[in-house]
Image (cartoon, rainbow, N blue to C red):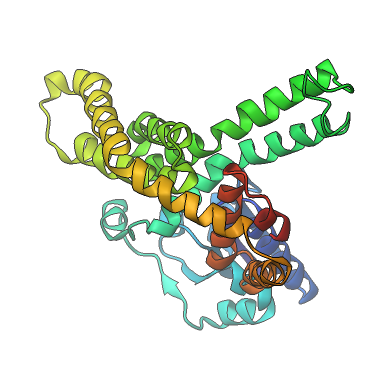
Amino acid sequence: MKIIGVTACPTGIAHTYMSAEKLEGTAKKLGHDAKFETQGIKTENRLTTKEIAEADAIILAVDKEIDMQRFTGKRIKKVSTSRAIKEPELVIDEALKGINTLEIAQSVEQTKATKQKATLYNHFMSGVNYMLPFVIAGGIIIALSFAFGITAADPKSADYNVLAAAFSKIGGDTAFAMMVPALGAGIATSIAGKAGFAPGIVAGLLASTGGSGFLGGMIGGLLAGYVTDFLANKIPVKKGILAMYQLIVVPLISILIIGLAMVFVIEQPISWLLEVLTNWLNSLGNTSGLMFGLIIGVMMAADMGGPINKSISTFSIGLMSAGVNAPIAAC
């Protein structure tokens, strides 16, 4: 039998490739031909029109919306990436037997009309996806700085090293400083498209510099996304002035609205909340800290990189940006 499919998770990192490897490896062990397209950071192992036409079973292990129009006229088995990893043999058996499969028979227009709306979780994961490169690269570069000595980046230190100082400036002062702005930009872009990028990054930067941190960045990113989406996509504009409207009016009004909201409405209460949370976490004793770390570990392992895992990891990364490092260590 010829089995093909697509795997895709919200961040496009771990589960996309784990599910593809599990399904493809299991199918080949069962004596079938198998090929799975991975829509991760980039799309790899693309399926051809011929392969789709000749397939005996098509499995879509996806946790986000993908274009299914090319599977028109074919029956597909749609599951989550987590189920594909946990039960690959059962998923393959159900796909071959036609159990709980559905036929793609809609036109492009119908597909767009019935496409599920992205959830808040999808928007947040998009923001995390924007943020991760800064976290990963910044963290590693800071570690390189520490390799010269914990205080080697401090000009007043006896073991000061100019290269360590440069690493600290690049990783800590710059890359890490972009974490919250990138989070806001990613969330807003997920909601409003490209028009949401500028308001989202402004919201994140205001949250970062204003003290409301990652919580402010998340709220600001959501607000930026919905305000920009309304201005850019919901208001009808005459074709003659559309280019000027999108280029000047949308970013001007959206950034102004978001900026004023962040400065006068969001910043103070969220900064207070983040400060309370930070002080509480820093005040935990050994026993309480151990229990909190245990909870983080359980949540990280609970659903194999699903919503619970990604929620607690995002929370821990956000606290790291506020100077609270114990949760990310447990994470």
Instruction: Check the image and report above or below for 98 versus 244.
Output: below
Instruction: Check the image and report above or below for 286 versus 52.
Output: below
Query: Residue 293: percent from the left, percent from the top?
Result: 69, 66
Res 173 → quadrant: top right
Where is the N terminus found, in terms of image quarters? bottom right
Instruction: Check the image and report above or below for 114 versus 166.
Output: below
Q: Nearer the viewer, residue 135 or 292?
A: 292
Residue drawn 10% across and 26% down?
Answer: 238
Q: Nearer the viewer, residue 8 or 143?
A: 143
Res 117 → quadrant: bottom left
Residue drawn 39% across and 39% down?
Answer: 189
Relative to residue 160, is residue 184 drawn left or right? left
Circle count: 0
Query: Residue 326: percent from the left, percent from the top?
Result: 69, 55
Relative to residue 103, is residue 54 drawn left or right? right
Query: Residue 142: percent from the left, percent from the top?
Result: 75, 33
Residue drawn 24% across and 25% down?
Answer: 246
Q: Nearer the viewer, residue 20 or 223?
A: 223
The answer, for residue 65, to whether it is visible in the render is no
Query: Residue 43: percent from the left, percent from the top?
Result: 60, 45
Residue drawn 39% across and 32% down?
Answer: 197
Q: Nearer the viewer, residue 283 or 93?
A: 283
